[in-house]
Image (spheres, rainbow, N blue to C red):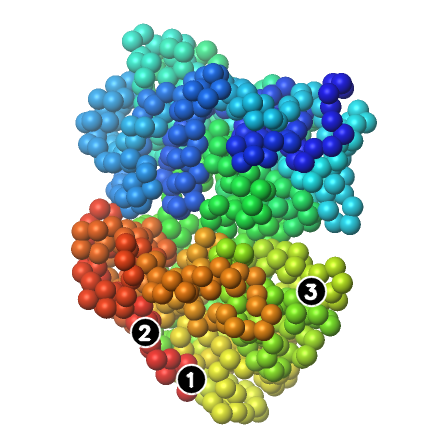
């Protein structure tokens, strides 16, 4: 034990790899100097030491990913000037190739988006690519994209340079110190206990333990779903005349990257069918360790890798390296404050991209710790997005083999995981499957994406960025919702019963809208942070004076629950109960929804008897159902919260009673297309913690003058006081009926690039692709500019004229809802 080991530090970081040292470095840059880093072995001895050191962008599909990446690339390129310790960064360039039209189309869709955020990704010809990478056989390449500023660095050098920078800023780093326990009291982390008996108390404990993080977190009751997997690269013997500045080449068709390595060639595998490693836990003493390569398993993958560089087969193999890397179920990192312990933070699960994304992750986490708010959109990386289901040994065993290939291979907009499925099912699953449902996966749930005419036809014939085989069936569902009536199983929605003397006070503090209303009122509201940024958008329904139901999308389950629990005052009496699993949500929507409901219920369902945004218990057959008259698709309808024990009977009754009304099942594709025609917002998909309700067009649900105010009130009031915003969310309809929108397509006003589409779908009623996105001008974005502007949307490098609107293009006066 070093004599200088302190007994207290403001922040203790567990782990001295890329992520731990990046976090320490960025904390000191923010003036947060009382930082201690504890590394159980030596710095970099976990997985950092054997990383390939690629500093390449890939295809980045979010603003946050671009910001994190460019921060890291720029830091590594310039860190030596500050610390005097080189990082080994060389901008040798980054080359992505495609040998099929779908991959070319994908790259053409994403490249303009990346250029918007400072990543110089541009298309080059196959011949240019061949000239840049002469050792390769690129004869089958149909398209290529190149980023000249990208390259490679030395992971150990980077970490040592960061360590020097962190020490210069006041941080203290101790090697050979293993943390055996995270100390906690009353649900708050208070410090750490080391294996040799030393205690360090702290205001913040940060888990940056790489592949050890899951088991360390579990010992403190923290859920960190990540799993180590075998990860391979091969290095050839020296190849004469191989350029030292050979660009990094990525070939998704072979799941391989290629770069020069001390005169030889490195072939790095991200093979499908990978192998999980040490499901029961990572040995504490696995320092600078290697795994015995499984030549038999990876042999076929190596053959494919060599097929891109057949000339390399003329040279021997210097090393086939196998080392572990940790992967998460959705291939995004685990970052942020843990729901289980206050003052405990985490950054781990980097999916073999710990060098690439280390600086960005460290920057985000450091700012989050210091400011108590993240500087970028974190909805996709927030550690609270997972449940404990995804951390079980069985789930990790089954999901991990798919992850490496899924990370590196070709991607499609609607591709779902194939492994570790059926984790969570609605009780209607069998009924829906028999009705022809094709299921996708979302947050562990099996969700009906669309319905085929028969179960045998419920398959995707070929993944594509263009129309797929289910497109016309989805169109029929969409039309049924607009013309007849549809049934949607929305059991995936998360439901929380909030009760107690101070339930109203809690929810009023959190909610921008007024929720202190009479029982039976459904209130749509945003929850915001102190900067006015979204933390959720949801409904709060008052069931009694001290009883509320909060309903939110499945992607916000953990975040919503955490936010409620974290804001209960010390003297307040409130209970929060997750009741999601005990009920089934069946939505009945469409112009004939009332006709159908009146056939199965004796309740008064007239507009005057059951007005819009009201909730009450009604009979539906034998069931006593909590019914909400709300909509997320822009049609007359009800959400029925049915006891799970009566859901199948209720579903059967509705389908039988609506047969002559044209009742149809409808899936998530139809939900998306309907809601986009109505321009409804969805937190985590098209608005996030960096957006605010005023600019998002939800000012009608913000009550700045409500008694007691709410979190974020002052920030939103200041935004409101500035008048017409320069940034506003706008709905777009492509005038040409052929193109498709998915998200990330750039928005042009004349020749000026002014924003991008957040999410898109096909508006079968409006007759074209529809999407919503934020537009930013250097002047107030008035309704007149929106209505008269010459708008265009860039789709894969081609611009298409579009109609823009601040009001919903479908039923702007809400006549269909309030009837």
Marks 2 and 1: in contact by CB < 8 Å?
Answer: no
In the rendered image, which quarter contains the C terminus?
Answer: bottom left
User: What residue lies at 67% left-to-right and 36% top-to-bottom?
Assistant: 10
Q: Residues within 10 Å of mark 1 (few under 14, many from 20)?
A: some
Foreground of the two, 331 or 87: 87
Examine the rendering and report whether any part of residue 493 can be seen.
Answer: no
Give the camera-side residue of 42 and 689.
689
Q: Reading the chain from its start, which is encountered first: label 3 or label 2? A: 3
- Residue 149, given in percent of the width and then of the height, sits at 32, 28
Q: Position of residue 173 (x, y in %)?
A: 64, 23
Viewer-nearest residue: 480 or 248: 248
First in sequence: mark 1 or mark 2? 2
Quadrant, the N terminus: top right
Q: Which residue is mark 2?
A: 810
> Which numbered disc flags the more N-terminal residue, 3 or 1?
3
Of residues 716 and 591, the one nearer the viewer is: 716
**Image coords of residue 579 (percent x, y):** 66, 66
According to the picture, the residue beneath numbered tag 1 turns out to be: 818
Looking at this view, name the residue that lies furthest to the right. Answer: 197
Q: Is residue 749 above or below residue 315?
A: below
Element at label 2: loop
Numbered label attached to residue 772: none
- Residue at image mark 3: 577
Q: Say which residue appears at 46% left-offset and 80% top-offset.
A: 637
Position in image of residue 801 (x %, y %): 19, 59
Q: Would residue 512 be found to the left or right of residue 113 on screen?
A: right
Mark 3 → mark 2, Cα distance in angstroms: 37 Å
Label 1 residue SS: loop
Position of 154 with respect to 37 (left or right) is left
Residue visible at 63% across and 42% down in the picture: 345
Helix, strand or loop at label 3? It is strand
């Amino acid at each position: 034990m070093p004599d200088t080991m302190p007994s207290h530090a403001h922040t203790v970081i567990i782990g001295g790899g890329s992520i731990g040292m990046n976090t320490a470095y960025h904390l000191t840059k923010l003036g947060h100097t009382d930082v201690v880093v504890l590394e159980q072995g030596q710095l970099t001895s976990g997985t950092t030491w054997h990383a390939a050191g690629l500093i390449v962008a890939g295809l980045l599909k979010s603003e946050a990913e671009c910001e994190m990446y460019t921060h890291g690339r720029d830091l590594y390129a310039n860190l030596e000037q500050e610390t005097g310790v080189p990082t080994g960064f060389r901008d040798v360039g980054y080359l992505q190739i495609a040998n099929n039209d779908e991959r070319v189309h994908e790259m053409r869709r994403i490249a303009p988006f990346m250029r918007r955020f400072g990543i110089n990704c541009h298309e080059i010809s196959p011949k240019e690519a061949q000239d840049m990478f002469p050792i390769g056989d690129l004869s089958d390449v149909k398209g290529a994209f190149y980023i000249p500023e990208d390259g490679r660095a030395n992971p150990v050098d980077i970490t040592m340079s960061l360590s020097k920078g962190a020490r210069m800023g006041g941080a203290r780093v101790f090697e050979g110190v293993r943390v055996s326990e995270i100390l906690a009291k009353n649900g708050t982390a208070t410090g750490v206990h080391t294996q040799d008996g030393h205690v360090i108390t702290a205001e913040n404990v940060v888990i940056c333990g790489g592949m050890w993080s899951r088991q360390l977190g579990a010992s403190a009751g923290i859920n960190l779903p990540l799993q180590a997997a075998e990860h391979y690269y091969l290095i050839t013997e020296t190849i004469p005349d191989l350029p030292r500045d050979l660009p990094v080449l990525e070939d998704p068709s072979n799941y391989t990257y290629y770069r020069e390595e001390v005169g030889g060639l490195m072939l790095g595998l991200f093979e499908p069918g990978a192998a999980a490693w040490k499901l029961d836990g990572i040995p504490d003493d696995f320092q600078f360790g290697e795994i015995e390569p499984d030549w038999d398993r990876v042999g076929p993958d190596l053959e494919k890798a060599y097929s891109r560089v057949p000339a390399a087969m003329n040279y021997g193999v210097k090393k086939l390296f196998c080392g572990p890397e940790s992967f998460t179920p959705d291939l995004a990192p685990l970052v942020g404050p843990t729901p289980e312990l206050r003052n405990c933070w985490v950054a781990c699960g980097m999916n073999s991209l710990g060098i690439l994304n280390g600086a960005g992750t460290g920057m985000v986490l450091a700012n989050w710790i210091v400011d108590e708010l993240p500087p970028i959109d974190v909805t996709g990386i927030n550690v609270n997005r997972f449940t404990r289901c995804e951390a079980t040994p069985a789930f990790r065993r089954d999901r991990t083999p798919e992850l490496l290939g899924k990370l590196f291979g070709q991607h499609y907009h609607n591709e779902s995981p194939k492994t570790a499925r059926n984790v969570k099912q609605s009780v209607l699953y069998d009924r829906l499957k028999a009705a022809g449902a094709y299921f996708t996966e979302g947050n562990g749930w099996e969700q009906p994406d669309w319905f085929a005419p028969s179960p045998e036809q419920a398959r995707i014939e070929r993944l594509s960025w263009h129309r797929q085989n289910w497109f016309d069936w989805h169109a029929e569902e969409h039309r049924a919702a607009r013309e007849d009536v549809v049934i949607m199983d929305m059991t995936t929605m998360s439901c929380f019963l909030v009760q107690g003397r101070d339930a109203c006070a809690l929810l009023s503090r959190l909610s921008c809208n007024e929720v202190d209303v009479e029982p039976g009122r459904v209130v749509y509201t945003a929850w915001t942070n102190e900067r006015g940024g979204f933390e959720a958008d949801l409904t709060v329904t008052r069931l009694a004076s001290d009883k509320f139901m909060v309903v939110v999308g499945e992607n916000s389950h953990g975040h919503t629950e955490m936010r409620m629990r974290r804001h209960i005052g010390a003297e307040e009496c409130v209970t929060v109960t997750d009741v999601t699993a005990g009920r089934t949500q069946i939505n009945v929507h469409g112009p004939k929804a009332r006709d159908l409901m009146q056939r199965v219920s004796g309740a008064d369902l007239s507009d005057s008897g059951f007005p819009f945004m009201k909730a009450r218990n009604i009979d539906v057959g034998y069931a006593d159902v909590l019914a909400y008259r709300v909509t997320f698709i822009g049609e007359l309808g009800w959400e029925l919260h049915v006891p799970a024990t009566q859901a199948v009977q209720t579903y059967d009754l509705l389908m039988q009673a609506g047969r002559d009304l044209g009742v149809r099942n409808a899936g998530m594709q139809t939900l998306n297309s309907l809601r986009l025609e109505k321009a409804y917002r969805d937190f985590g998909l098209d608005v996030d913690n960096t957006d605010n309700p005023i600019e998002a067009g939800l000012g009608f649900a913000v009550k700045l003058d409500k008694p007691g105010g709410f979190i974020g009130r002052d920030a939103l009031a200041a935004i409101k006081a500035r008048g017409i915003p320069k940034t506003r969310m706008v709905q777009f309809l492509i005038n040409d009926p052929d193109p498709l929108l998915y998200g990330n397509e750039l928005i042009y006003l004349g020749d000026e690039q002014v924003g991008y589409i957040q999410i898109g779908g096909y508006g079968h009623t409006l007759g074209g692709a529809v999407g919503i996105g934020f537009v930013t001008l250097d002047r107030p974005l008035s309704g007149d500019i929106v209505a008269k502007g010459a708008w265009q949307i860039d789709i894969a490098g081609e611009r298409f004229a579009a109609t823009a609107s601040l009001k919903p293009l479908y039923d702007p006066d809400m006549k269909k809802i309030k009837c």
